[in-house]
Amino acid sequence: MAIRKEEIPARRCRLPALNHPISFVGAGPGAPDLLTLRAADRIRRAEVLIWTDSLVCPDIAALANDDCLRIRTSRLTLEEVIPQLIQHQKAGLQVVRLHDGDTALYSAINEQICALNDENIPVEVVPGVSAYQAAAAGLGSELTIPGLVQTIVLSRAGGRTGVPECEQLHHLASLRASLCLYLSARHVEEVQATLLEHYPAETPVAVGHRVSWPDQLLEIVPLNKMAEFTDQHELIRTTLYVISPALSKASKRSRLYSPDHDHLFRPKR
Ligand SMILES: C[S@@+](CC[C@H](N)C(=O)[O-])C[C@H]1O[C@@H](n2cnc3c(N)ncnc32)[C@H](O)[C@@H]1O
């Protein structure tokens, strides 16, 4: 007997659309209104949302439709995540893999995308606002001040997974740039000691915990109090440090808007 189309549940009605991509989406630091428009669109259209629940603010996952299948990844291995991505994509569903912050930083999207490439499954990547940007914005700060600091370094303390020798903290600290340290709260004593070999003790350090979440903590302390402050507030996870002379709010103007600096858009008058 022929089945009439309207008798088939909406999802089963679809033909597997093997060419539609899995979306890897950067969820931003936490506040839903810091999502990009594209990220918000993908989350709202998701039929399967595979999300990093250990780091992504639940307010973001809540933006998906009620009937979206939500899968938390905090207890899963890569070997368990990949089949979920493949299975739902092959069933023709809109699959979103949601990571915190920006996808370019410590998101582990690379190993997932490589595995999907092996299966010829297309992906798209939607960037997000990273924690360091949210922290700087939350403090009303620019991290590149003319004549003071012109470089931003994004890195992490070695810890269990380590960093290559040429990127060890003492090398990075010797630049005295604006240094944003992710994933480093567990090693803060060691981090502070290394940084003090290069930056003055009073260098401002922004300590951000759950920046842009409803319970955000975001304060500036001198470098020699960085570990004490972290300990006092029992910060271990979702904590970012920005060590930067720029946070001292020294008033220095840029050449860009100087009357004696002409350029293509403002030629000599
Ligand atoms: C696995 S990394 C991912 C970083 C993320 N892709 C990004 O661009 O922000 C997780 C680390 O990012 C930092 N982080 C992420 N979101 C944060 C937030 N809202 N506030 C403070 N730190 C955050 C913390 O250092 C945390 O341990």
Image (cartoon, rainbow, N blue to C red):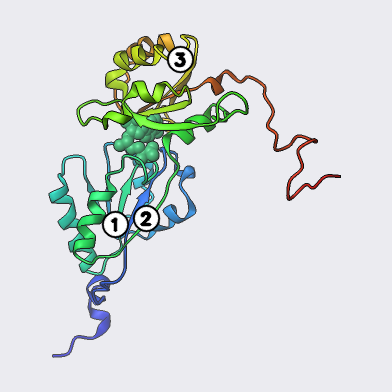
In the image, which disc is placed on residue 199?
3
Label 2 amino acid? Val
Task: Measure the alpha-carbon separation of dots 2 and 1.
Answer: 20 Å
Residue drawn 57% across and 18% down? Answer: 248
Looking at the image, can residue 212 be seen? no
Front position among marks 2 and 1: 2
Label 1 secondary element: loop
Label 1 amino acid? Cys
Q: Nearer the viewer, residue 57 or 112?
A: 112
What residue would you read off at disc 2? Answer: 125
What residue would you read off at disc 1? Answer: 68
Label 3 secondary element: loop
* 10 Å crowding of disc 1: few (<14), some (14-19), many (20+): some
**On the picture, is 205 further left or further right than 237?**
right
In percent of width and height, residue 2 lies at 17, 90
Which comes sooner in the sequence, label 3 or label 2? Answer: 2
In percent of width and height, residue 179 lies at 44, 26
Count of residue discs: 3
Ligand 1 is within 8 Å of the C-beta of the residue at disc 3: no
